[in-house]
Image (cartoon, grey):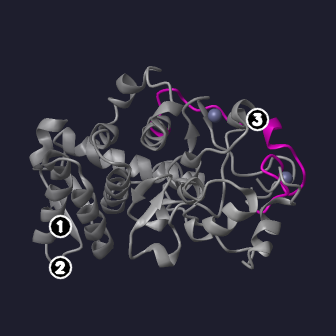
């Protein structure tokens, strides 16, 4: 809207609102933006989401969906699919979820760094389609991803949850997602419950995070997203195969809260049982920071 109205990108909108360049626009800005540009306030509020600190009490939401934590979203370090920008001319809200690292429509990785100036892509850019160095985002060549990869299956689950009509659901989706235990668990869950469960599984998983084997500090990086997904899926796979599992719960309070949220948001009792099983194991283990078992012993076994 800023570009179409001759304003120089988001920075000039923020300064017009009296906001700092570090402010993340959200639903609380919708009324004034609606007056400026004429777009319906409700549409703007839904697109911007309720993600500021003041939204914490009512619950965070994004793209019209309730989400448990504001850190499920990555509004500071944007990612794009260049092919989508060419084809649709807008950015998709699904790209703003930290764990979405790929475009299910074009089977490519999302890009978050400019290949010309090598800087991280930033929302404070001259227009939607150009980097701060004026390189056109639509000319970028994203890396391909494996059609059968976990990150693509997960990105498809988020895309369907956010905007069902945006995704051709026939494109091999159900069959391919079925090979990942994590995706089988997520399918019946709401977006918020599924994200809570994924983070809870990843944060208790004791296994190597794959690739570099190191935890990535930057929580908004694409590598971090891939590692969280791998860790969560690996834990589910071990449980489903009856392998011994080890839960690391040094971040116990966070894990418990995430599991509780996943359980509470589940649409039916069965959906919540994996979360409930993990929750009860962690509670029973008391002050110990590790729980190991010969088998997963989870009531959800029949699901796998
Ligand atoms: Zn795309
Ligand atoms: Zn650039």
Q: Could you say which disc has been placed on residue 287 in the image?
A: 2
Q: Is residue 253 magenta?
A: no
Q: Quadrant of residue 254?
A: bottom left
Disc 2 + disc 1, Cβ < 8 Å: no
**SS state under label 3:** loop
Q: Which mark is residue 141?
A: 3
Residue indicated by mark 1: 282
Nearer the N terminus, badge 3 or badge 2?
Answer: 3
Q: Earlier in the sequence, mark 1 or mark 3?
A: 3
Q: Quadrant of residue 117?
A: bottom right
Q: Which residues are magenta?
A: 124-151
Work out whether residue 160 can be spotted. yes
Vertical side of 50 occupied by 145: above or below: above
Q: Looking at the image, how many numbered discs can be counted on the residues?
A: 3
Foreground of the two, 198 or 138: 138
The residue lying at 26 percent from left, 62 percent from top is 259
Marks 3 and 2, how far apart at CA = 50 Å
Of badges 1 and 3, nearer the viewer stands 3
Characterize the magenta stretch by its predominant secondary structure.
loop
Distance between the alpha carbons at the discs numbered 1 and 3: 45 Å
Q: Gap between marks 2 and 1, in whole Å?
A: 9 Å
Is ligand 1 within 8 Å of the beta carbon of the residue shown at mark 3? no
Instruction: Please indicate, yes or no, whether residue 250 appears anywhere in the rendered image.
Output: no
- Image-based side of 277 in relation to 104, left or right: left
Mark 3, other Cα within 10 Å: few <14 / some 14–19 / many ≥20: some
Label 2, residues with CA under 10 Å away: few <14, some 14-19, many ≥20: few
Label whose residue precedes the other's in the sequence (2 or 1): 1
């Amino acid at each position: 809207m800023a570009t179409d109205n001759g304003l120089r990108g988001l920075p000039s909108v923020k300064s017009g609102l009296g906001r700092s360049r570090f402010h993340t626009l959200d639903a609380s800005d919708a009324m004034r933006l609606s007056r400026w540009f004429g777009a319906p306030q409700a549409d703007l509020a839904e697109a911007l989401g309720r993600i500021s600190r003041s939204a914490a009490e009512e619950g965070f939401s994004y793209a019209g969906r309730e989400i448990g934590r504001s850190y499920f979203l990555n509004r500071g370090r944007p990612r794009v699919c260049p092919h989508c920008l060419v084809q649709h001319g807008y950015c998709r809200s699904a790209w703003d979820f930290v764990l979405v690292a790929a475009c299910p429509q074009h089977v490519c990785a999302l890009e978050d760094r400019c290949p010309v100036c090598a800087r991280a892509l930033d929302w404070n850019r001259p227009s939607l389609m150009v980097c701060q160095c004026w390189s056109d985002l639509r000319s970028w060549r994203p890396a391909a991803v494996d059609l059968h990869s976990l990150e693509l299956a997960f990105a498809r689950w988020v895309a369907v949850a956010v905007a069902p009509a945006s995704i051709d659901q026939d494109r091999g989706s159900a069959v391919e997602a079925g090979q990942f235990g994590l995706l089988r668990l997520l399918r019946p869950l709401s977006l918020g419950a599924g994200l809570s469960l994924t983070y809870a599984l990843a944060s208790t998983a004791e296994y190597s995070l794959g690739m570099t084997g190191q935890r990535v500090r930057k929580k908004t990086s694409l590598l971090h997203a891939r590692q969280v997904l791998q860790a969560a899926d690996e834990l589910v796979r071990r449980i489903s195969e009856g392998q011994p599992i080890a839960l690391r719960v040094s971040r116990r309070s966070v894990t418990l809260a995430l599991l509780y949220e996943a359980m509470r948001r589940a649409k039916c009792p069965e959906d919540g049982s994996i979360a409930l099983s993990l929750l009860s194991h962690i509670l029973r283990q008391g002050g110990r920071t590790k729980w190991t078992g010969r088998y997963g012993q989870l009531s959800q076994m029949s699901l796998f």
